[in-house]
Image: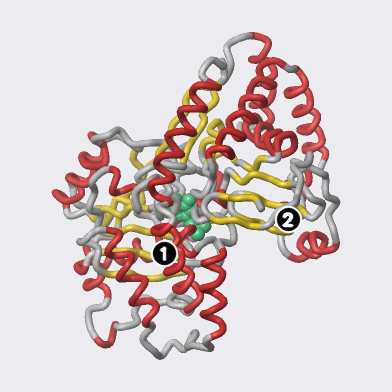
Amino acid sequence: MLVLGTFAFPCDTELKPMPITAAGPTHRLYADHVNPQWVRLLDLLDMNVQYEKCVGCELFTHDGARILDFLSGYCVHNTGHNHPRIIAALHAELDRNGPAMLQSHVSDLAGELAARLCELGGSHLRKVFFASSGSEGIETAIKFARARTGRAALLYAQGAFHGLTCGALSLMDNGFWRQGFGPLLSETEAVPFGDVDLLAQKLSDRQFAAFVIEPIQAEGGIRLPHPEYLAAVQELCRRTGTLLVLDEVQTGMHRTGPFLAAHRYGLQPDMVVLAKALSGGLVPAAAVLMTDEVYGAVYTSLQRALVHTSTFSENGLSLRAGIATLDVLEQERLGERAERLGSLLRERLRHQLGGYEMVSDIRGAGLLCGIEFRAPQSLGLRLPFEAFARIHPGMFGQMLVRRLFREENILTQICGNHFMVLKAAPPLVVTEEQIEHFVRALKRQVEFIHSSRSFWADALGLARRALNI
Ligand SMILES: Cc1ncc(COP(=O)(O)O)c(C=O)c1O
């Protein structure tokens, strides 16, 4: 019996080097009918393996390899993969043959989950709109902010990631995500994350319905705000009648320690968007927490009782999973665990990686951690690094991710809008031993990058293969 986090599961699997799994028949169907480019990309990176079972922080492949998950599906698996109590709650919900998708009844489960989210979110957040994805939550925030303020324009922070539906995408300045999908919402504008003066200038003419911001930018490179920044943002928003919308899709649900990252900074936002970890990584769910004033501006009359809704909004499985997820987070004290183990992770990483030329910063909050790399100065490293960068700016980081996966059986990723930052965000049930294992593995790979030509040579070989594909 292997004890993982705070729950145990049977396990007799040895840690084995990664096998390369040939695409099986299901992969062929996927490639034929879903997304062939995704299959090709995973094949190219040697990361296309067949997972059979995922438990806690570990993923088991069909041929017996065990992989440590330090990605959590981009902060979906805060409670660990397939938590037995959340699974049991879902079974119970299915077994009771209760009302589902009637679109004609009042959902008690929605009431119960909303009440708990409001209590955890802070007393000023009194209403909740449920949705199925983070992007849909952001769309909701856009519409509700416009309804509340009567203003059309929206402000957001450079480097943000808010989702890929048209409205959410309009709040992202990275051209990679936007290219080919325009025209998007026209009245949106970006300001640098952390720049109070420019924000004050932008907000002063009271054109913006909302400032939408991640309190800690996740895909932007695990960028933490200056300690006073968000309080100043809130003050400016209040003064100018601009709603403060916090995107806590990655940072919420105790990922950074407290229930919301907003609580780290003593904020009282007008709306908070939650998704990802809300339903234990098992069913799609999102929630937009908001003040009575915001809610009241949308549902203004009987006629408008359903003016903003969605078929799957209050579906029983998501809500039941949400309630069970809150129970697990609370009973296993995963917020405190995130705080304590996150500090340990950063301390150990700083100790082990501090002296390396290419490691420029280790930062984070709770178990949302970033390891930033920089271009090397020494000639021996600079030339191959520059060759990498010419091929693709994400090449270096992706090669590190690949090596961690292939050589160390650890799943990680680089940040989507900052390719020089490796993200370390394990499930909050991670153990001290698993943290130590990750730190030692990363140290080995960083040492390899600094001391072996084969890191660079292998990767350039891979790049040639990619260009030929
Ligand atoms: C901070 C943030 N907001 C919003 C989203 C969009 O969420 P979804 O993919 O569920 O639409 C993401 C997705 O990664 C995210 O990281």
Q: Nearer the viewer, residue 227 or 296?
A: 227
In percent of width and height, residue 341 lies at: 46, 39
Q: Secondary structure at mark 2?
A: strand
Identify residue type, mark 1: Asp
Q: Residues within 10 Å of mark 1 (few under 14, many from 20)?
A: some
Q: Nearer the viewer, residue 431 or 391?
A: 431
Q: Is residue 182 visible?
A: no
Please report the residue visible at 57 percent of the width from the left and 11 percent of the height from the top. Answer: 377
Residue 421 position (above or below residue 218)? above
Please report the residue visible at 36 percent of the width from the left and 86 percent of the height from the top. Answer: 106
**Mark 1 beta carbon near ligand 1 (under 8 Å):** no
In percent of width and height, residue 406 lies at: 74, 37
Residue 122 position (above or below residue 456)? below
Identify residue type, mark 2: Tyr
Left or right, 433 with respect to 332, comes to: right
Q: Residues within 10 Å of mark 2 (few under 14, many from 20)?
A: some
Q: Which residue is mark 2?
A: 51
